[in-house]
Amino acid sequence: MADRIRSDAGAASRRRFMQQAGAGSAAVAAATLGLAPQEADAAAQAFDGSYDVVVCGSGCGGLASALFARWQGNGAVILEKAGSIGGTTSKAAFWYWVPNNEAMKKAGIADPKPDFLKYVARLSNPQGYDAAHPRFGLTPWEYEMCSAFYDSASPAAELLAAKGALPYRHVADVPDYFAELPEDKAPKGRVLVPKDAIPSMSDGGLVAVRTMSTKARAEGIPIRTGMRVTKILQDKSGRVIGVEARDELDATVRLRARKAVIFATGGFTHNAELRKNFLNGPIYGGCAAPSNEGDFVPMAGALGAQLRNMNYAWTCPIPLEKAIAKDGSISGMFSVAGDSMLFVNKYGRRNVNEKLQYNELAQTFFEWDGARAEYPNLVRIAVWDQRSQQHSASAEYGRLIVPSGTDDRHVIKGATLAELAHAIDERMAKYAGVTGGAKLAPDFLPNLQAAIARFNQFAKTGKDLDFQRGERIVEQLFNGDVKQEPGRSNPTMWPLADAGPYYAALVVAGTLDTKGGPKTDTHGRVLDAADKPIPGLYGVGNCVASARAVPTGPAARRWGRSSPSPTARRTRRMPKAGAPHEDLARSLVRTGREPGPGAIAGPAPGANELHPVPQLRQGRAARRRPQPARPARQAGREQPGLHFLEAIRRRDEGQDLGSRAARQVAHRRPGGRAGQHDGLFPGRPEEARRAHRVHAITQVK
């Protein structure tokens, strides 16, 4: 297939394109509202290339969509706006949450569909949940989306593994974020991670991008970086027939899509205008890829797409300084590290369980004080002592307590609490222009001292009588390394020291990414205001609307990042028999035959709809920097705590939590391959064929 690149300024050679693809990230511009679709016959329009499917975005959603299309015999191309591939997925830990997965079945863990849907309904629609209702209180659309997710998530994961695009390993001990709810009949077993992720599982996104992009290139799918899509092209009938993009040299490129244009371009975390107009709380940016500027919202809106859930986002606490600096390396605080650590607000009062899972913790920053007309928790202050600094420092999962030699510009230090309070006040004054003039209350220091004294009393008993810190299994899951303390019952708490030095950081609410956008159906088709598909236009991932959103409580576990629980599902499944525009993919599913070379040389009559549009959501924005080596440990110094999965296992068995040595033993696999899943459906050809029917997003933490 020819890859000519034309522009208004003249032809650009393939050599120039290859040079552009290797260049650094393009400067990101704000999304422009009010774009109008191009209406002209495809035959009358000049294109620089023609494919069956044009995919916009190279995160997990885009890579998976292109691969599924290719495996159904279609030619595909991936356009990436940034100068490098991967999007938010490349920053993610990439724990993916797959109900009723094959590994669960092999382990004898039951996950029946009715129970799963009841659990999903309970979390995603708490105000309307009705266990006696046929759909548990969900609307027909919401129920269909969640149902399609259950049916298709595991086959999607198996097909990707079987094809070598995304081999995985099962992490059976990771609990659901709301494992204690009676509706959750399978509280463990749904989590998979890329097979080659490190033991702490913090680099899964990089692994996924590497394996999926390698497979895409091996399948002949070109990936073009530095290509920002600016227009969706339509013919006179209103059918989407391609896109117009601008490359890094500002040259115009027009690509034709014979069957479908699939957008997987992420949410609008980095579009300040959209954030201000739609999100329902004081959000200070976030940790999605810098290219996530909501480009799809105005383009789809110009075509009459229906928007949903624009006021919600996947949220997490983030450090104020990095958010204001628009630091592309910023990570959400998936794990609030430290046991001798607490949060207070500007009044010096502790008013939250610091170990809440990140989405729920971030929601508490939005509390409004009607009497004072302010957000009292707009900026919280994390305070910790030398013990936590020494034993809980980590560069993973967005932790504020970081090792020496790493980026610690957010850390405030003081030899005493009084000195620390003074330094905090100076830091807050520096950012007063972006916090509404927030500053410490006159009685901050005595209130802080009182808060620490009360916390220390709770820590000595292991019972947080105010906020129940550490009582839920998920809070211990994300506790991070802590110093071993034999016999203690609550590893998330330990008294702060009576003497310094002390440390602090300013914390605000941010997004992992937003979860609103054009509404789609279970086939991934973008819907207009009348709930009718816009022909030829599809959306996957954070650029389209989640099936359900609530302001507090659960968020869907997504490809590439950790989010609280299984609620908002964007699922894709095959159309029912007799649906219009039956194409080769339908034939493939019926016959079980792989298409031969050249099976799709061009669109067959009536075959313009690409019904199978799998969605694999990109997600969790966790910083992916190599962790620097830590200094050699001093003789006699205790090792930091064990890995969280081993901690949970020992907790469940009533054992002492042990040392970091247990962490290494827990993850030692004979030959480095134990637990590897082959994904080949041995002896089950029917299941292998059914894998081609996948049209759901497999969601992750």
Image (cartoon, rainbow, N blue to C red):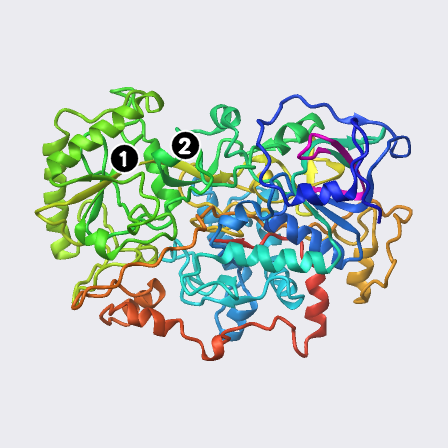
Asked if residue 214 can be seen in this view, the reply is yes
Using the image, tell me which numbered label, if any, was put on residue 380. Answer: 1
What's the amino acid at mark 1? Arg
Kindly tell me whether residue 550 is visible in this rendering: no
Query: What span is in magenta?
Result: 245-262
Q: Was residue 581 drawn as part of the magenta stretch in this picture?
A: no
How much space separates mark 2 and mark 1, taking CA atoms? 18 Å
Q: Secondary structure at mark 1?
A: strand
In this picture, residue 592 sits left or right of residue 293: right
Position in image of residue 331 (x %, y %)? 42, 44
Identify which residue, 129 or 453, lies in the foreground. 453
Q: Nearer the viewer, residue 255 or 686?
A: 255
Marks 2 and 1 in Cβ contact (< 8 Å)? no
Amino acid type, mark 2? Ala
* Residue 239 % position (x, y): 80, 34
Q: Which residue is mark 2?
A: 325
